């Protein structure tokens, strides 16, 4: 059985357990409704990713080529490291000289001192130095605008490459699946427990239209940092719990039921000025003109 078929079967079984007539339309609607609920929740709180994520790590006064390089450096430093630590390291690095020319002239020992204590800082110092040298020797200081080309850089895999081209060039080649997106996608039933991050990316991209891909990472990362945490999610604080097959799973070990009405009345999502905006189901009341919750953006 192909992985896509297995995934569809998985979700069908999930829907069956929820006493929903599971056809492919309702499966997609369920995932959209889950994401809409999460997107709506994300409007009510700020998470570390919002102010310290990779999109915040460059010096906006630097030359554009160096800004792109700093975004790449932030991406290389970020794995196995909390946003707070990466952001502090980048602040130090930028203040002491984090341009392509600066880094070509620095020793790896000097770079290590600046980026400590990010995880695997010794290896990452080597990656950063080689990236600067490669940009100078092979790319005339211009960061390549393609995931395939960026993956040639040391320490850069598809996840970081996707994120960097998205931030630097507004070029979305795929959904960025990090540890938060992977975990939450599995908890929500979009992917199987045994799926690798690359499989999760394919499945999430199958479910959601391309215009939603750029916002999915930041919505889910912030949600994962504050509510759907590893290892213990705060399901009591989660507005999506009535739609989630993993809600309070360990605590109650009961099969949850979802009213079919939740699926039929499914909201949708749209992109507006680069922002994912949930279209919340219309309540049975007259909306006041001041009630603008449908249009509040939270991604910049
Ligand atoms: S109900 Fe719990 S496991 Fe499910 S998405 Fe919400 S926080 Fe995560």
Image (cartoon, helix red, strand yellow):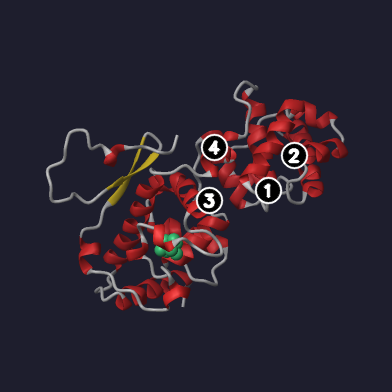
Judge by depth and name the residue closer to the eye, 186 or 206.
Answer: 186
- Say if mark 2 contacts mark 1, CB within 8 Å: yes
Q: CA distance from mark 3 to mark 2?
A: 21 Å
Q: Secondary structure at mark 3?
A: loop
Classify mark 3 as within 8 Å of ligand 1 or not, answering yes or no.
no
Judge by depth and name the residue closer to the eye, 153 or 217.
Answer: 217
Residue holding disc 3: 176
- Say if mark 3 contacts mark 2, CB within 8 Å: no
- Say if mark 1 contacts mark 3, CB within 8 Å: no
- Relative height, residue 242 to residue 227 (above, below): below
Q: Earlier in the sequence, mark 2 or mark 4?
A: 4
Q: Earlier in the sequence, mark 1 or mark 3?
A: 1
Residue 51's disc number: 4
Q: CA distance from mark 1 to mark 4?
A: 23 Å
Name the residue at 58% across, 39% down: 52
Residue 156's disc number: 1
Q: Earlier in the sequence, mark 3 or mark 2?
A: 2
- Relative height, residue 130 to residue 41 (above, below): above
- Say if mark 2 contacts mark 4, CB within 8 Å: no
Q: Earlier in the sequence, mark 2 or mark 1?
A: 2
Residue 131's disc number: 2
Name the residue at 36% across, 78% down: 255
Relative side of 168 to 120, left or right: left
Please indicate, yes or no, whether residue 256 appears anywhere in the rendered image: yes
Q: CA distance from mark 2 to mark 1?
A: 10 Å
């Amino acid at each position: 059985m192909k992985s896509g078929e297995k995934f569809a079967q998985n979700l069908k079984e999930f829907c069956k357990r929820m006493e929903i007539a599971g056809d492919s339309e309702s499966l997609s609607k369920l995932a959209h409704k889950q994401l809409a609920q999460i997107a709506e929740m994300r409007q009510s709180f700020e998470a570390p990713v919002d102010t310290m994520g990779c999109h915040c790590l460059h010096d906006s006064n630097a030359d554009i080529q160096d800004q792109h390089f700093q975004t790449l450096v932030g991406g290389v430093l970020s794995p196995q490291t909390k946003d707070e630590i990466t952001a502090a390291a980048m602040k130090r690095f930028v203040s002491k000289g984090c341009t392509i020319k600066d880094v070509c002239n620095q020793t790896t020992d000097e770079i290590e001192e600046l980026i400590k204590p990010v995880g695997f800082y010794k290896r990452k110092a080597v990656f950063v130095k080689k990236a600067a040298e490669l940009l100078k020797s092979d790319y005339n200081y211009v960061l390549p605008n393609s995931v395939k080309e960026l993956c040639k850089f040391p320490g850069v895999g598809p996840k970081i490459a996707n994120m960097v081209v998205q931030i630097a060039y507004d070029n979305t080649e795929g959904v960025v699946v990090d540890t938060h997106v992977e975990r939450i996608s599995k908890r929500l039933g979009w992917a199987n427990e045994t799926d690798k991050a690359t499989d999760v990316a394919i499945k999430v991209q199958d479910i959601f239209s391309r215009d939603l891909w750029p916002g999915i990472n930041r919505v889910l990362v912030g949600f994962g940092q504050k509510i759907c945490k590893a290892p213990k999610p705060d399901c009591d604080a989660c507005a999506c719990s009535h739609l989630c097959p993993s809600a309070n799973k360990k605590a109650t070990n009961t099969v949850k039921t979802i009213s079919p009405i939740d699926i039929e009345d499914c909201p949708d999502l749209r992109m507006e000025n680069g922002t994912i905006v949930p279209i919340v189901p219309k309540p049975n009341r007259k909306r006041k003109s001041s009630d603008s919750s449908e249009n509040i953006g939270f991604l910049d």
